[in-house]
Amino acid sequence: MSTALDSGRRSPRNLLRDGVARLLSRKRTPATDQGTNERVAVVATLVPGSRERAAEIIAGGAPYGLRLAGFERHSVFLADEAVVFVFEGSQIEGLVRNLVNDRASSAGFAVWAPLLQGTPMLAREEFHWETGQSK
């Protein structure tokens, strides 16, 4: 079973940077207005038996300043075998790229390395609905 610590190349910072690069290389959906919130999720598989430790880390809050980084909202969903980090803000791809590339902020991701199995994936929002919209 491989974890994110199995090789130097797969550090938490490099895992997220690689995921962001994949997301940014994908064909973009139509651009949104500067003030429109967008969402992106980082989906990671947990090493079996690590859910309790993941819950402890999450209870400690984000290891970086979400408001200072420009995010409007941030949520973390935890299942027995996965963790999903949802980031929301205007021009979200740039915000996530800046977070991952900032050494001080990305150092906070290291605590997750022993808990992750495989490479986290970035998921771009493909559908969103809220009250007040048609359909």
Image (spheres, grey):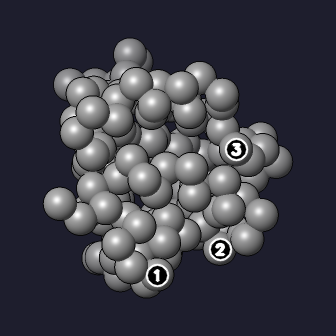
Identify the element where label 1 is drawn.
helix
Three-letter code, disc 3: Pro
Residue visible at 22% across and 39% down?
Answer: 48
Q: Earlier in the sequence, mark 3 or mark 1?
A: 1
Badge 2: residue crowd in 10 Å (few <14, some 14–19, many ≥20): some
Quadrant assignment, res 46: top left
Badge 1: residue crowd in 10 Å (few <14, some 14–19, many ≥20): few
Residue visible at 29% across and 76% down?
Answer: 27
**Pointer 3 residue:** 63
Q: Can you say which quadrant of the picture contains the C terminus?
A: top left
Three-letter code, disc 1: Gly
Residue 36 picture location, percent across and down: 57, 46
Residue visible at 72% across and 59% down?
Answer: 105
**Pointer 1 residue:** 8
Give the Cα distance between marks 2 and 3. 15 Å
Residue 21 picture location, percent across and down: 42, 78
Could one spot residue 4 in this view of the protein? yes
Residue 113 picture location, percent across and down: 46, 57
> Eyeballing the image, is 127 above or below 129?
below
Which of label 2 and label 3 is nearer to you? 3
**Pointer 2 residue:** 101
Quadrant assignment, res 83: top left
